[in-house]
Image (cartoon, helix red, strand yellow):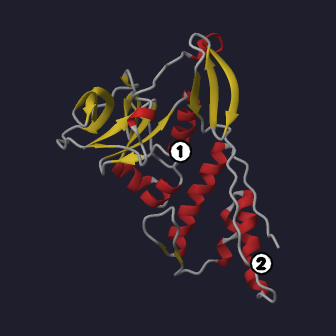
Amino acid sequence: MAILIEGLSVVIKAQAVIAKFPGGWPAFEASSPNETLCADNELVRVGFMTPDDVKLFVDTLSDHGIQYLSQGKSDDLVIVDQQKGFCAPCDWAEFGQVDLAGHPEKKISACRLIGSNQPQIVLPDGWLYESSLSANYKFVESDQVAEEMEFIRHDNGVDVYRDRSSGKEKYVGRVTNQVKVSALSVEIPQGTDPLKLEACRSFARMMNTLDVSHLIPWLADDMTYSSQWVFESIQGKEAYVDYITAKLETVRKSNSQVWAEIAH
C-alpha cells in the first residue's frame, strides 16, 4: 500500500515505531501532534506545514531512538516534500504522484515501502480532496513570507495570512507554540475517601509538572488503562508509565501550557 504525502511529511518505518517508541503504537498514536496521521502497516506518516514543526517532531522521535539520518542516508524515517520528494537519500521507500481513485484531475503525492505492490492509498481520517493541500497548495520560501504574505491572526493552532497578490486568505497549521487547553472533570461526592482525593491531586501534580513520578506510587502493578485515545487497553503499571511518559514528553517539547486543578 501507500500513504498520502502533503506539505512536509515525516514518514517513519512502522516497525521502528513499534520497536522503539515508548508504549509502542498506542502511545505513538495518542501523542500524534495533529490530525494528519495515517499508516498502511508498513509506513507511518505525519504531515506539517513549516520546517520548524518538522524539526520539533523529528527531535522528539530522536529522543526515543527513532533516527533520521545514518551515514548521510535516511534511517528510521525520511522527510518528504509534497512537490520535490525525499529531502535526504532514501533506499527503502519510493515517492511519486498518482491519480486519486482513477481521476486524472485529482493528483496526489504518495509514498510507499519499496517492494510493496498494493495499489491502495491510505488517507487520514476525515481527509477530503477539495479542502486538502493537494488541491490548494502554495509554497513560499521562508525569506519571502513577509513580502508575499501578510500575517492576520493565529486561530486555534492555525496561522492565517493574506496573500498580497490575490487577496485570499491562506492557512498554515502549526504545532510549535500552539497552546492546547483540556479540562478533566471528576465528580467527588461529599465524604469521599481522602485517599481517592489525594490520588486525584497526584494526577494533577503530574500534569502540572509533566513528571510521572507523582502518580507512580498510586498505580497497581496489574492496573488496566482504557481511553478513547488508544486502540487497546494498556495492561500493567510498567506499560502505562511508558505510555504516559511519552505523552508528557510530547507536551514538554511542544511548549504547550498545561494545568490541572481540583474543582468543586
Q: Callout 2: 10 Å neighbours few (<14), some, many (20+)?
A: few
- The answer to which quarter of the image holds residue 176 is top right
Instruction: Find residue 211 and report its horizontal and vertical position in percent.
Output: 69, 60
SS category of the residue bearing label 2: helix
Residue under the point 30% across and 51% down = 41
Residue under the point 54% across and 68% down = 240
SS category of the residue bearing label 1: loop
Q: Quadrant of the C terminus?
A: bottom right
Residue under the point 51% across and 43% down = 62
Q: Is residue 94 left or right of residue 130?
A: left
Q: Which residue is mark 2?
A: 198
Q: Earlier in the sequence, mark 2 or mark 1?
A: 1
Instruction: Find residue 111 and report its horizontal and vertical position in percent.
Output: 31, 35
In front: mark 2 or mark 1?
1
Q: Which residue is mark 1?
A: 34
Q: In the image, what residue type sits under mark 1?
A: Asn
Q: In the image, what residue type sits under mark 2?
A: Glu
Vertical side of 211 occupied by 80: above or below:
above
